[in-house]
Image: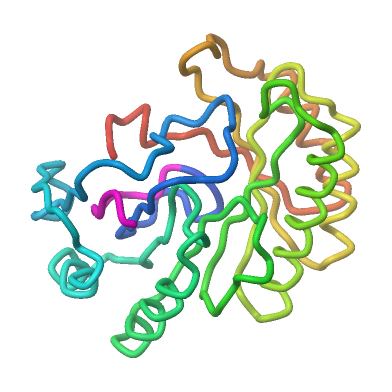
Amino acid sequence: MIREVFSSIMGEGKFIGKRFIFVRFKQCPLDCIYCDEPNTPEGMARVEEIPGSGLFTEYLDIDNELIQIIENLRTPDLFAVSFTGGEPLLYSQKIKEYSKILHDKGYKTFLESNGMFPEKLSSYDYASIDIKLPEHFKDCDMEFWHELYRKELETIERLYYAKCNVYAKIVVFEETSVELLEQIARDLSKIGDITLSIQPVTPTGDIIKTVSKKKIFEIMAICGRYVDVICTPQIHKWMGML
């Protein structure tokens, strides 16, 4: 279920630069072309023993030890515990249990999700919901994409009205449609005061270039008509952090 647990700064999105403990879950139903995480159930769980050290110990199973592992990694500058992946809501019942214990111990929780499971949500302090674009998938089925987008908006809306500090994140390519992003920004504005984080794609695998400054500024100017918009590249990768 859990792939790894470690302490680092948030390298993208609305809370960039904040210290988090990341709990990364295995597997995701989607297969985005830019994803750099293994999408398999196999492998040992690994735990960073000293916060920020990047030194890991492998374990067969840490599901029942997670709370103590988090306690061991807690530092005075900690902002929140992030449930990330993969897709963490594949394990929604366990995350609900973890969240209650963590809240009782004074932790804040953060959900990072692709938004395809609005019915599996529980209570979080913060959330980042990835809005996927057709170009994020190889040979995208547009009927599938429209249904996924509907669920993403529903997820954001449910979190927003549950008083979660939720924002939307979109990975953009040079060929990304500005018109589509404008429509997404307009849809988000109908929900409420939602920040939109534009993330230029990080070159990986077959993706060899990122997004031009001109395209980024064009996207932000148009989306800014409807929502609070920020641009956050993956700075943790630039800095060599986890």
Task: Say how many tags the image has.
Answer: 0
Viewer-proximal residue, 111 or 108?
111
Residue 50 vs residue 154: left or right? Answer: left
Residue 116 image point, x, y percent: 67, 55
Viewer-proximal residue, 74 or 231?
74
Give the answer, above or below, for where 34 lies relative to 161: above
Q: Quadrant of the C terminus?
A: top left
Q: Which residues are magenta?
A: 1-11
Location of residue 153 by image quarter: bottom right
Residue placed at 40% from the left, 85% from the top?
A: 100
Residue 199 image point, x, y percent: 60, 35
Location of residue 188 by image quarter: bottom right
Q: Quadrant of the N terminus?
A: bottom left
Q: Is residue 6 magenta?
A: yes
Give the answer, above or below, for where 242 lies relative to 213: below
Residue placed at 40% from the left, 49% from the top?
A: 10
Residue 80 image point, x, y percent: 38, 67
Residue placed at 34% from the left, 90% from the top?
A: 104
